[in-house]
Image: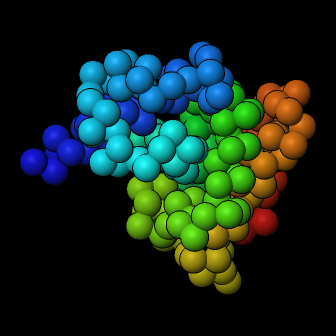
Amino acid sequence: MKKSINSTKSRIVSAAWQLFYEQGFDNTTVDEIVELSGTSKGSFYHYFGSKDALPASLSYLFDEKYEELAETMDPSMAAFDKLIYMNQELFLMIENTVSVDILSRLFSAQLISPERSLLDASRTYYKLLRKTVIEGQQQGVFSNEFTTTDITKAYAMFERGMMYDWCLSDGNYSICQYAAQMLPKFLKSFC
């Protein structure tokens, strides 16, 4: 039953973000989201009180991407390279499917909502980051001078900062290209 529930919520979230990207947040209706997701209004309102609750679900979509990456990533890849690969894949997804307006709404919602989904340590994102950082420390790639928590938190802050700056700059540069230049330099500070 849980898989069906997650599948329904996932379909709603995926449909909403597709429509938001294509039409914009303000031009998308709940009826269109329900129709594209193949669900019902009752299901929509079971998971979301309104369309305005959806920006916070972007972190759910990010976690789906990380679940996919966890399954397809080469396990023999060095931890340093895994972190760069995960970042590039996420930022590529953002550039291609998430508008600056929607990402800005996510950050805005996180600032005013008591529920801070981006900081939820139980998210797939944080689990995968912690696992990768631990691997890196065991491989001797990352210094044991820093705790796993320190490195994981700093990496997450770096990514959020890059996304936030991209929003402030109205997406006028490639977040993927900029991260490809800056993330390796940032990560080397933990080696």
The residue at the point 52 percent across, 29 percent down is: 17
Q: Quadrant of residue 45?
A: top left
Q: Is 173 situated left or right of 58 in this image?
A: right
Q: Quadrant of residue 93?
A: top right
The residue at the point 52 percent across, 60 percent down is: 117
Q: Is 98 situated left or right of 9 in this image?
A: right
The residue at the point 63 percent across, 70 percent down is: 153
* Quarter of the image with the C terminus in it: bottom right
Q: Is 43 situated left or right of 60 in this image?
A: left
Q: How many marks?
A: 0
Colour basis: rainbow
Q: Quadrant of residue 112?
A: bottom right
Q: Position of residue 142 (x, y in %)?
A: 63, 68
Residue 29 sits above or below residue 114 on the image: above
Residue 139 appearing in the image: no
Residue 80 appearing in the image: yes
Q: Position of residue 164 (x, y in %)?
A: 78, 49
Q: Name the one closer to the observer, 125 or 151.
A: 125
Q: Position of residue 82 (x, y in %)?
A: 54, 47
Q: Is 92 situated left or right of 129 in this image?
A: right
Q: Name the one closer to the observer, 94 or 101.
A: 101
Outermost residue toward the left in this view = 1
The residue at the point 42 percent across, 36 percent down is: 13
Q: Position of residue 28 (x, y in %)?
A: 56, 23
